[in-house]
């Protein structure tokens, strides 16, 4: 479980094909790994990854085909900057919102404009995710917890303040940039709960298709 408050910006050291899936080596920059052990979870651009090695300058993680197919991980390259957040400790403040680290789909930056001292981003999302995005609701973009300001069909807008631009990878975004999206987990569970007994019907197309 995570909060969507980015702790550090790291970078991809290397990507290696391993038996049909992927092994990532990630440099964690200033992220403190003193309390991280093998088997712990770290969110990388919003993707919850399990630490399998701790080489000293970061960590190594394996990425399944499910994750590759559902996220932008497959397009990551050596040197690319990434947002990092360690798993939430029970004693920590929940500064953002409840984030699972299970990406729902990949969106695309449609435009970026200056808005006073902020930056206004418009993003296009897969049609099947649009129903979970609400005005003034929460959305996670590459692991960053944000508030939705505008919703228009399968597009939405967020305003990013200078602090967030400086402490996340959002400063790198341009039109066409692909990003990992996680919708509000409460909305997903609420939708399924409202189905009642129909949720057990195999004929129901209940999965998010991205």
Image: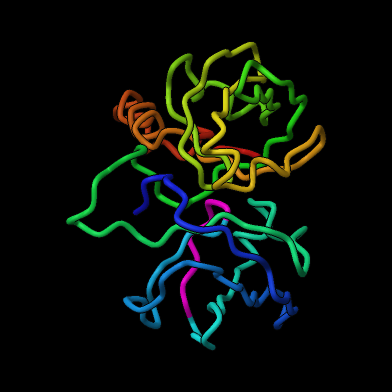
Q: Is residue 82 visible?
A: yes
Q: Is residue 207 visible?
A: no
131 in relation to 207, above or below = above
Write the start and end of the magenta stretch as one range. Answer: 45-51
Residue appearing at x 50%, y 38% in the figure? 140
Q: From the viewer's perspective, tell me whether residue 138 is left or right of residue 117.
A: left
Which residue reaches farthest right?
A: 176
- The residue closer to the viewer here, 20 or 206, is 20
**Is 50 covered by the magenta stretch?**
yes
87 in relation to 21, above or below = above
Quadrant in the picture for residue 186? top left
In percent of width and height, residue 76 lies at: 74, 61
In percent of width and height, residue 187 lies at: 39, 28
Q: From the viewer's perspective, tell me whether residue 84 is left or right of residue 64.
A: left
- The residue closer to the viewer here, 207 or 60, is 60
Quadrant in the picture for residue 63? bottom right
65 in relation to 175, above or below = below
Which residue reaches farthest left?
A: 91
In percent of width and height, residue 1 lies at: 34, 54
């Amino acid at each position: 479980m995570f909060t969507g408050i980015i702790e550090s910006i790291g970078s991809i050291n290397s990507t290696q094909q391993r038996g049909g899936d992927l092994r990532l080596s990630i440099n964690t920059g200033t992220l403190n790994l003193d309390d991280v052990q093998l088997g712990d979870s770290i969110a990388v651009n919003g993707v919850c990854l399990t630490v399998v090695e701790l080489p000293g300058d970061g960590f190594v993680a394996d990425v399944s085909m499910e994750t590759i197919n559902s996220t932008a991980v497959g397009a990551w390259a050596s040197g690319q900057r990434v947002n990092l957040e360690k798993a939430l400790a029970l004693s920590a403040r929940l500064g953002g919102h409840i984030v699972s680290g299970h990406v729902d789909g990949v969106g695309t930056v449609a435009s970026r404009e200056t808005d006073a001292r902020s930056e206004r981003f418009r993003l296009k999302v897969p049609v099947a995710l649009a129903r979970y995005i609400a005005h003034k609701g929460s959305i996670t973009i590459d692991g960053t917890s944000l508030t939705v300001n505008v919703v228009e069909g399968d597009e939405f807008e967020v305003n990013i303040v200078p602090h967030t631009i400086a402490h996340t990878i959002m400063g790198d975004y341009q039109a066409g940039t692909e990003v990992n999206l996680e919708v509000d987990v409460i909305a997903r569970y609420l939708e399924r709960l409202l189905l009642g007994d129909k949720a057990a019907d195999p004929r129901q197309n209940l999965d998010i298709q991205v």
